[in-house]
Amino acid sequence: MHKIVICSAMMIAPGGALLMVRKKGSPYFQLPGGKIAAGESDLEALVRELREELQFDADDKTFEFLGQHETLAVNEPDTLVEGHIYLIKLSEERCFSAEAELEEVQWITRDNWQNYQLAHLAEEFVIPKWLSGTI
């Protein structure tokens, strides 16, 4: 089985909504972020990915490390994904458009999150933290 390492952002709006993205050709919603390139740190990769996918400029002082989780990748067969997850609490409501390999960007709420097909990393690690109200 192959393994990929990614860095993702759990982006929370002031009202508590969670930002999820869907890549082109995939039915699964996941956190914005992506694979860590050779020689990149987690945060360098995350800043790069957020700029590419969402045109969002952040610096590494914006992020709070939440933890890492390993599970099956949903978009790559026979592959484990190790996700390094960081929290970004936005100070204002933002509207993002899908860029690069993204097809859709969606703010989900505690009332409608079950209406979305979620990647395993989001479903197993992110959603429980978000629903617990501790973030």
Image: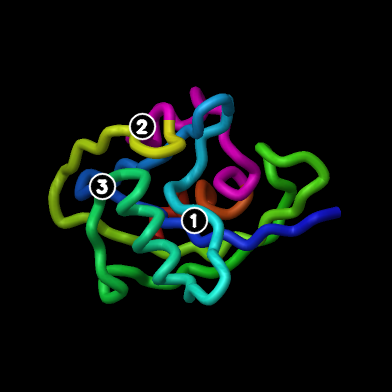
Q: Is residue 28 left or right of residue 106?
A: right
First-in-chain label (3 vs 2): 3
Give the label on residue 55, or none: 3
Q: Foreground: 85 or 100?
A: 100
Task: Where is residue 73? Give x, y as percent.
Answer: 69, 45
Label 1, label 2: how many angstroms apart (C-alpha)? 19 Å
Q: Quadrant of the C terminus?
A: bottom left
Identify residue type, mark 3: Gln
Task: Say if mark 1 contacts mark 2, CB within 8 Å.
Answer: no
The percent coordinates of residue 130 (x first, y second) are: 44, 51
Magenta stretch?
103-123
Q: Which one is in front in this view, the residue at disc 1 or the one at disc 3?
A: 3
Residue 64 versus residue 13 in the image, above or below: below
Give 126 or 53, whichever is nearer the viewer.
53
> Label 1 is placed on what type of residue?
Lys
Q: Secondary structure at mark 2?
A: strand
Which numbered marker is on residue 129? Answer: 1
Asked whether residue 33 is drawn in magenta, I would say no
Circle 2: residue type: Gln
The Cα atoms of the two marked residues, 3 and 2, are separated by 15 Å
